[in-house]
Image (cartoon, rainbow, N blue to C red):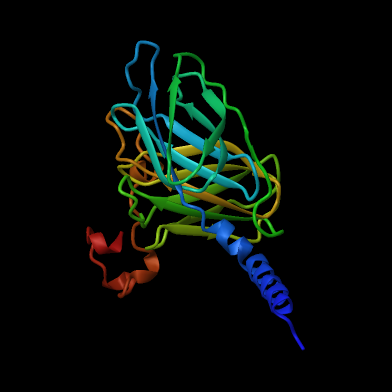
Amino acid sequence: MQTTGTHFRRACLLLSLVAASIGPTVATDLPLGRLRGEIKQAGGRGIPGVTVVSARSEAPALLLLTSTDPDGFLAMDGVSPGEYRVSAWREDYRLNEVDGVAITGPYRFVVDLILVPGRFEWQPIRLPSGAGSDPAFSLQVEDARGRPMEGVLVRLEARGMRSDPFEARSDEKGEVRFEAMVEGTWRLIISRAGWTRIVIPELSWGGGEISVRARLLPAPEGLPLALDEMLPRAEPLASEWRGSLDDAEPGDPSFL
């Protein structure tokens, strides 16, 4: 005959097993945080067009990229909880950074940094291991309102090793993914005509798949144009000619 105590112990055991099975799922559903701040000169004036990089210190590797607006303010929503190193730079200012930025949802963390005019010296970004084991790269790009951006050029160039570059434009979901990569150091370029261009000269991570989120803003006046804005549009290929060379008259533009 089973007693009430026996049923109670079995119920406790069942609850423990259920809790253990759903524990990891609950951990991944933590509320997202927000990052806010201002990048300014020593006199207090905001600096536009400053690249702001937030690198999560713990695995899996996560990188957040954005730029300051015309008043020097930065904003990043939907930030996964964790501890980050936030770096800020522009080509005519010295790099400044702050470590140990702990972001937890649904709260907002404010970072204010002062940049000093001077020679720019880049510091490589080294990230922990990403998800899985095979080196891969995934990026999601959005505008200031958090809407996916299509047609953004994303390029990875190998640094100090032999590998062909990876290049693609973001799809309608604002996503790009590169696979079959080799572990090493890469140069990352994110660019679209009329928008701020983000360049990371040296980026590496400890294997696995790295996740990158980029938030682009309209390009401030006076900053260099994006690469795809300086290059002319591709012309139709010669194979598109429907006639023959004998059919073309001198001066006919379709012959050129």
Q: Position of residue 95 (x, y in %)?
A: 52, 22
**Closer to us: 92 or 19:** 19
User: Residue 80: percent from the left, percent from the top?
Assistant: 51, 48
Q: Nearer the viewer, residue 32 or 227?
A: 32
Q: How far across and down, in percent of the image, does residue 183 sit?
A: 71, 50
Which image quadrant is residue 198 in?
top left
Q: Residue at x 37, y 40 (%)?
A: 226
The vertical placement of 30 against 41, above or below, is below
* x 37%, y 38%: residue: 75
In this rendering, the count of numbered labels is: 0
Name the quarter where the C terminus is drawn. Answer: bottom left
Question: Where is residue 29 shown, x and y percent of the image?
Answer: 52, 58
Q: Give the side of residue 170 with respect to residue 134, left or right.
A: left
Q: Residue at x 41, y 62 (%)?
A: 171
Tell me which corner region of the image, top left, top right, bottom left or bottom right, holds residue 115.
top left
- Residue drawn at x 40%, y 12% is 42
Name the residue at the top extreme. Answer: 43
Q: Is residue 82 above or below residue 122?
A: below
Farthest residue, direction right: 1
Quarter of the image where the N terminus is located: bottom right
Which sits in the foreground, 125 or 1?
1
Residue 39 falls left or right of residue 183: left
* Residue 17 sits above or below residue 61 on the image: below
Q: Is residue 157 above or below residue 53?
A: below
